[in-house]
Image (spheres, grey):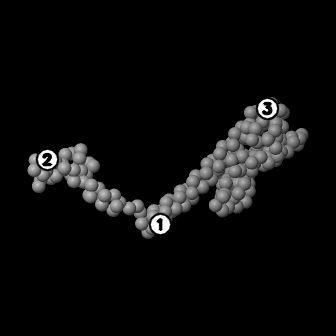
Amino acid sequence: MATRRSKLLKQFAIDFVERSGEFYAGNRTYMRNRIRDQRGFNLIELMIVIAIIGLLIGVGAVAWGAMIRSGNETAAAQMIDRIRTYQAQYAARNRGKFGTFDDLIRVSGLDEKFAGERPVVNGYIFTLTLEEPSDARPGFYSITADPQVGEGVTATGTRHFYTDSSIGTIKGTDENRPAKADDPSI
């Protein structure tokens, strides 16, 4: 008895057996045994796969949190710089007087998210302090941006930022306290 297989039939594991000049399909028992032997994962293999997936999710969550914090910090520093520009434009039009967040929204085009006294934008709390100009001294403003949640897994940022009308840069600190004028520039 000779066994022949065509390329197509090899794909389906079908054997034709030649008996006295005729071909017969000899795959029924083979296929039945093959299907019976195909079992899924056993419990140990399944637990290993689940543990690996859990590990990947855990590492990914930590990296994702770090990426979000970094993005929030960058956005806060950029917004302080933009507010500083808006304040300079506002003061030039208003005889040296600086504007509140609401003034800057109305006149300079600051984003509506900054409405109110202490707006929270991208996980940072922005605080604006103003001093009116007088004959003895010019007007003054200071802006701080502090993370809404500064520590832990749910931290929205770790850096604190500061600028005011008398300095030309943004100051920052990694310490868990508001930044001030004598902190290093970023």
Q: In the image, 82: left or right of 4?
A: right
Residue bearing the label numbered 1:
47
Q: Give the percent coordinates (x, y) of residue 133.
A: 86, 40
Residue bearing the label numbered 2:
22
Q: Which amino acid, mark 1?
A: Met
* Of labels 1 and 3, the one closer to you: 1
Q: Give the percent coordinates (x, y) of residue 10.
A: 23, 49
Q: Give the percent coordinates (x, y) of residue 52.
A: 47, 62
SS at badge 2: strand
* Of labels 3 and 2, the one closer to you: 2
Q: Tell me the crowding category of disc 3: few under 14, some 14 to 19, or many 20 or more residues within 10 angstroms, Cα based.
A: few
Q: In the image, 30: left or right of 55?
A: left
Residue bearing the label numbered 3:
107
Nearest to N terminus: mark 1 or mark 2: 2
Q: Tell me the crowding category of disc 1: few under 14, some 14 to 19, or many 20 or more residues within 10 angstroms, Cα based.
A: few
Please identify the quadrant where the N terminus is shown.
bottom left
Q: Residue at x 61, y 51 (%)?
A: 68
Q: Which amino acid, mark 3?
A: Val
SS at badge 1: helix
* Of labels 1 and 2, the one closer to you: 2
Alpha carbons under labels 3 and 2: distance apart? 95 Å
Q: Tell me the crowding category of disc 2: few under 14, some 14 to 19, or many 20 or more residues within 10 angstroms, Cα based.
A: few
Q: Give the percent coordinates (x, y) of residue 72.
A: 65, 49
Nearest to N terminus: mark 3 or mark 2: 2
Q: Are marks 1 and 2 in contact (CB under 8 Å)?
A: no
